[in-house]
Image (cartoon, rainbow, N blue to C red):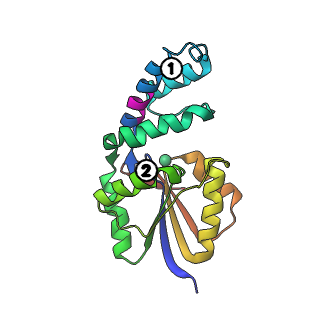
Amino acid sequence: MKKLSAIVSDFDDTLFFNKKALIYAAKELYESLIKDENINQDYKLLNDLEITIGEGKVAKGFNKKWKNKLYTLAYVKYGEELSPNEPLINYLNEGVKNGSELIILSARGEEFRKETEGLLNAHNLNYNSVILPKDHELKDEEWKLLEIKKLSNQYNNISLFEDKEENIRYILNNLDVKNLRCYLVNHSIITEM
Ligand SMILES: [Mg+2]
């Protein structure tokens, strides 16, 4: 039998804001790379890092080899710079009180499970499980789509909370399930799509 309902939430920039940590990480990586003669000619990489330093987000098509290094710095070394989205956390915990199961769905990757669960626990999120990809072979939105498809077979209703509009659009355009509602999160503003 299917369970009643699940709240599925993204992690970064939905439940926790990671801009500051990403900026610190990008600065550190940038400074180490410009000293390296083999790499300081990679203008695309340096330019992408400048984008992260300026905007606190990772550019599309960011160098795969350096992506993990950047995220490791951000999530592990500068992990304490992540700040909670308190209104959303309270809202989702309220949903749990009312009988939903809270599932965290993040493309961060298994390599960051410890840090991810550590923050969730420190901020008293009453989650049921944390789903992370074992590798990064699929694009984030493709991986999320497959996971939501699986969840839609386990739950009667799913509410998805996510900060990336393009991820929600991709899921809505490619997944034909009736029991899914998607909400775009922008800090404390939640909009159904
Ligand atoms: Mg996100």
**Residue, disc 1:** 33
Q: Which mark sits nearer the N-terminus, 1 or 2?
A: 2
Compared to residue 120, the image places residue 3 above or below, namely below
Left or right of 127 on screen, residue 182: right
Can see residue 60? no
Q: What residue type is disc 2 on?
A: Thr
**Residue, disc 2:** 14
State the residue at coordinates (66%, 61%): 146
Q: What element carries label 1?
A: helix
Q: How crowded is mark 2: few (under 14 residues within 10 Å), some or many (20 or more)?
A: many
Q: Where is residue 188 in the image (x, y as percent from the top left)?
A: 36, 50
**Range of residues picked out in magenta:** 22-26
Q: Nearer the viewer, residue 130 or 29?
A: 29
State the residue at coordinates (62%, 35%): 64
State the residue at coordinates (38%, 64%): 92
Q: Does the residue labelled 2 lie within 8 Å of ligand 1?
A: yes
Compared to residue 35, the image places residue 20 above or below, namely below
Q: Residue furthest bottom?
A: 1
- Pick the quarter of the image with the N terminus: bottom right
